Image: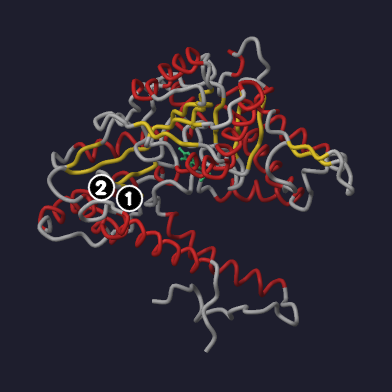
Amino acid sequence: MSAYPYEDRFAINRRLPEEGRPREEVLAELKAMAVEEDAFWETGQCSGTMYCGDHDHYGFMQEAFGLYAHVNALQRDMCPSSTKFEAEIIAMGLDLLHGEAVTGTTPAGLVTTGGTGSICHAVLSYREQAAATRGVTSPNVIKPETAHPAFDKACHLFGIELRKAPVDPETTQVDVDWVEANIDDQTIALVGSACNYGYGTVDPIAELSELALRHGVGLHVDGCLGGWILPFGQELGYDIPVFDFRLPGVTTISADTHKYGYAFKGTSVLAFRDRALRNSQYFFLTDWSGGKYCSPGMEGSRSAGLLAATWAAMVQIGRKGYLGYAKAIFEASAAMQEAVRSHPELRIIGKPTFLFSFTSDDFDIYHVNDFMRLRGWRFNGQQYPNALHMAVTRPQTQPGVTEKFAADLAGAVDYARDHAAESPQSGAIYGGVIGGMNDEADGFIRLVMADMMDGFQQVPAEG
Ligand SMILES: *Cc1c(COP(=O)(O)O)cnc(C)c1O
């Protein structure tokens, strides 16, 4: 099979076509690909990524998007509506994250392009503020090993040392004593996840909050995944600890509207306890010949369409809507976790929420993945230990999906038991390197990954 999709079905555009094509023809081509690709996740058998899956909702957001897609949110004099959308998205986010509990400072926010965008802006603001107010010149950030790679990326980009705290293998929660022992006068911020992407577990944010206050450093809570669903889980009575601005040491929270906010890809809220921290990363160029320039974040031009669509999603769904979706998701997740627990060979890692991860002490869990893949399931693969994770989203709340999961899982466990002596097929893609990671293995994996990424952006050679 070719790595380049659709080459046998649609012409490959190696150059800009001389003559433009009719709109209907272009749209028909787009539609053919979209419909086929949507069919893959519409079954409800795909972990995460399609948080909403409701085509009526997508249609509604497309209308909102279409009205403003051509507008540049950077030019506010021409689109004051963008201020309404952006300010209200932030206000609604702060409401959900208990901004009302903040005293002494003014809570504020930014709408960024996604989770990575929010995390990068948070890290940048800590660096800028620590440099200005504490004279920090060799900044470091401490994250739990389980926290998202976006922190590694942000630290890499901004010249910050990242210290990775170990986690308890049983609970997957960060070792708070290790964090404390590694704070020094150059530490700008600590990180905790609510919840993390790998295991769906929540770090001891209350303890991190105390640490942050005691040492006078920031605390970023990564609620990229959980920010728009865990507050509703709390309201529904699930055992989810407080992780938001009600904890006085929490200084920033990222919460992705493009995940459980059910908005289009391309937006996230970064909430700040203190407006001054946000403003520390504002960019100004006052003496440019092209005019005085400023931007509130790293992006330049932005589509007002995404702001409009995100705002429309939030006000259309409302608190009760989000609560109802959260209820269905938590119930589906509980049913799927129960199916996993019914097999003594399988083990759920830590105390998960709507997202859970499972492994096996009896066989390589990728055998289970091999079988489940043939039945149409798509999990996210993990390593150290090999595990599979399922982020439960609205497509899994359709009738019959959790039942199919339970039935297929039973078959998968039988299959894994029978094939325990062999090495699993999908293990090579996702699993840990045999014999452990070393420089040689790392170099090889980087080459394979770079080759894969190259492939994403090139047309096949001619001839
Ligand atoms: C998705 C995610 C991120 C990064 O978000 P992107 O939107 O992919 O940039 C960060 N943290 C967690 C916990 C996430 O799930």
Quarter of image, res 306: top right
Q: Residue at x 39, y 45 (%)?
A: 396
Against 10, is 150 above or below? above
Query: Of helix, strand and loop, which one carries label 2?
Result: loop
**Res 446 seen here:** yes
The picture places residue 394, in percent across and down from the top left corner, at 45, 42
Q: Residues within 10 Å of mark 1 (few under 14, many from 20)?
A: many
Against 270, is 247 above or below? above
The amino acid beneath tag 2 is: Asn
Q: Earlier in the sequence, mark 2 or mark 1?
A: 1
The picture places residue 266, in percent across and down from the top left corner, at 61, 46
Image quarter of the N terminus = bottom left
| Residue topped by disc 1 | 381
Q: Nearer the viewer, residue 221 or 5?
A: 221
| Residue topped by disc 2 | 386
The amino acid beneath tag 1 is: Gly
Q: Is residue 448 left or right of residue 387?
A: right
Q: Is residue 277 left or right of residue 69?
A: left
Q: Nearer the viewer, residue 79 or 342?
A: 79
Q: Residue at x 38, y 26 (%)?
A: 203
Quarter of image, res 284: top right
The picture places residue 450, in percent across and down from the top left corner, at 45, 63
